[in-house]
Amino acid sequence: MHPKRRTLALALPATVASLLGAAPGLPAAPASVPAAVGSDRHGPKPTIVLIHGAFADASSWSGTIRRLQRAGYPVLAPANPLRGLAADTAYLRSVLAAVEGPVVLVGHSYGGAVISGAALGDIRVKALVYIAAFTPDKGESAAELTAKFPGSTLGGTVNPRSYPLPGGGTGTELVIERAKFHRQFADDVPAADAAVMAATQRPVATAALEEKAGEAAWKTIPSWALIATADKNIPPAAERWMARRAGSHITEVDASHAVAVSRPAVVTDVILDAVRATR
């Protein structure tokens, strides 16, 4: 049995009140990335694909990756573009197209919305794992899901800035003020580590937070959810409500939104629970 665990929450102003959502669809998968290493009477081990959310990067999974690799699992943690839900979902599908064999998809925060869309129709995806994450249904955005429950303080910590769009014009992206990052995003992470996270945070486009999700893969694929009860980005009540709606296996832990950094052992345990239950 695991101790009670909690999730993270991302809050934004009224128009951009949350992290990322999901989009549907997915291509067939040729094999260029090595297949899952190792096999046993249950078949080959799945490749575990870890998708970070807004204001983070793939290094946030470092502690989890080390533990999964020690357990003999192949792991991928690609960069999430954070530019738009449909575009980010399409990018993840292209990553999955290069993976051979079964897959377990893990999403943190906005990454939960991305995995929900990318897994749609892919029979190789055996489980979805939501780590302090959005679990949107069709037509929902991260912003509106964050605003659905009180508790997020993200809106008072972010600064908007412009960036050039590929086709011309400008978009708006959000960053958390460095001086406020530790308390808002990673309150249970050592200050020195949180300062590095603040310096390396990847901005999220407001369009990504406001974009409506497509069909949700969690309706047909088994799911697990880790709720971070000290989350100041996504209200824990929102995480819990989404997880219950999806029928996810729920674990709660007293942790900040940066639960993958502060509690990698707990995150790894939830992922391995999903792996063992679906092999």
Image: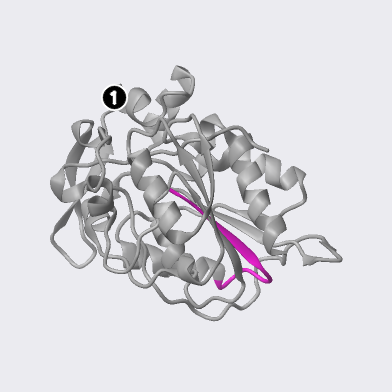
For the record, the magenta segment spans 97-108
Point out residue 72 in the picture as x, y percentages from the top left corner. 77, 51
Q: Is residue 84 left or right of residue 135?
A: left
Point out residue 55 in the picture as x, y percentages from the top left corner. 36, 41
Give the residue number, with chain letter if any, for mark 1: 180
Which quadrant is the N terminus positioned in?
top right
Q: Nearer the viewer, residue 159 or 166?
A: 159
Q: Nearer the viewer, residue 231 or 35?
A: 231
Q: Is residue 253 left or right of residue 134?
A: right
Position above or below: 158 against 243: above
Q: Is residue 229 left or right of residue 148?
A: right
Q: Amino acid at mark 1?
A: Lys
Residue ranking furthest to the bottom: 28
As for residue 268 lying within the magenta part, the answer is: no
Point out residue 85 in the picture as x, y percentages from the top left corner. 32, 62
Position above or below: 171 against 220: above
Residue ranking furthest to the right: 41
